[in-house]
Image: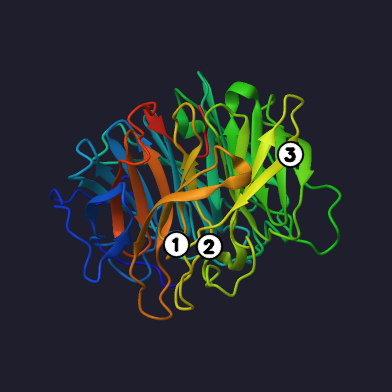
Amino acid sequence: MKRLLVGLVLIAGCTTAPPPAATPTSAPTPEFTITAGLRHVANVPPGPPFDTPESFATDLAFQGRYAFAGNYGGFTVYDIGDPTRPTVVARVLCPADQNDVSVYNNLLFLSVDVPRAGPDCASGPGDPSAETQFEGVRIFDITDVARPRYVTAVRTPCGSHTNTIIPGDDVHHVYASAAGPAPDTARCPAPHELVSVIEVPAADPAAAKLVATPVLFTDRDPGRFGGCHDVSVLPAKNLAVAACYGDGLLLDITDRADPKVLQRVTDRRNFSIWHSAAFTPDGTKVVFSDELGGGTAPMCTAEVPGNKGGTAIYEITDDRRMRPLGLFKIPRAQSEAENCVAHNGNVIPIEGRNLMVQAWYQGGVSVWDFTDPAKAREVAAFDRAPLAAGTLGGSWSAYFYNGYIYSSDITRGLDVLELTEPPVAGAKRLPGLNPQTQE
């Protein structure tokens, strides 16, 4: 994929464009379909330098009144103090795939899972066969959110497709997941069966370093890809779940640098690519998504059988085992022209019900109720009109945060939705949200 070469002011190894406040606009017509109980309140379209076909919007993280949105070209900081009028605070040019983002206090972590010539934001594409190429995690200081400052980068053997932060008082741990199966590099031959563990001293983030690369699969069938795409953590219970190629894992993370596999589950009938996972707020259940087709294929047509490309609900028992409870897939059939499959989301932190907000690429944003896991059902949906045939797009991530739903749309920017039915006024307000970290 082409790299962005947009000239902006150079600031400490990255480029930052603090744009004027952006006025939210309506989506272009034809706009979207939306169910009763859900209201579309704002859209902030991509702006320079992220308004090119190569600049896919990716994941989201939140802290206070700010949302941080990853992008193949870098990342954007939004002020969401008024969710109906979000504004752009900064756009940071720092090209890499896929620039998944996590934030904690004054630090931002950005994933790099494609070889770059060097660790800083100004570096160009790297040579996969070169030992000097960089893949891993870049770290920024966001004390001034309008001017994020590049601090350092930590090289990991297999790069970082996604990252998960486990905050600590003195030391933070970051899990860098690299699912594979491509690209293979001189530092990481397939099947990428490890997770990289980075330690970040809270008082000296520039001293961040790789401390361990535990292998999570030691008995896989030869030739099977075993990399983990995503790790979600529940630090209070020293538990994590990993969504991996062909398997879901339950992990003991008592020793943050040495996660241990408690259980491995498979479901060859319903699941292909275990992509991501989300705990319920009480930690008694976990929802896995299946990215059948890799996110580029139409897996929500009437012809795709059963729950393939959907989600699975598991109970986490008192003896720390996972037990299957149910399956869910959006009931709205999409066209052959629309890439659609289960993707990133979170469970609304409200007592008495289990409500999931989830992105489905061009299947839009779904809100579904799995209070009864055996009868999970969609209760609200936002579905944009199809893009031109052959165009990849749709909602990459959708999360509930402090009363609103935020959707990172690959080509259309940031959408903000308000859920009024079912009522969520009693949902817990959070100081921040890294969806992979259940605090």
Look at 83% across and 47% down and name the residue there: 218
Look at 31% across and 69% down and name the residue there: 52
Q: Is residue 104 above or below residue 117?
A: above
SS type, badge 3: strand
**In which quarter of the view is residue 198 placed?**
top right
Q: Is residue 402 above or below residue 375?
A: above
Q: Which mark is residue 341?
A: 2
Mark in front: 3 vs 2 = 3
**Marks 2 and 1, how far apart at CA:** 7 Å
| Residue type pointed to by label 3 | Arg
| Residue type pointed to by label 2 | Val
Look at 29% across and 64% down and name the residue there: 32
SS type, badge 1: loop
Disc 2 crowd, CA 10 A, few/some/many (<14, 14-19, 20+): many
Residue 36, position as x, y percentages in the image:
31, 51
Q: Which mark is residue 400?
A: none
Residue 57, position as x, y percentages in the image:
38, 58
Which comes before the other along the chain, label 2 or label 1? 2
Q: Is residue 384 above or below residue 158?
A: below
Q: Which residue is mark 1?
A: 361
Which comes before the other along the chain, label 3 or label 1? 3
Q: Which mark is residue 323?
A: 3
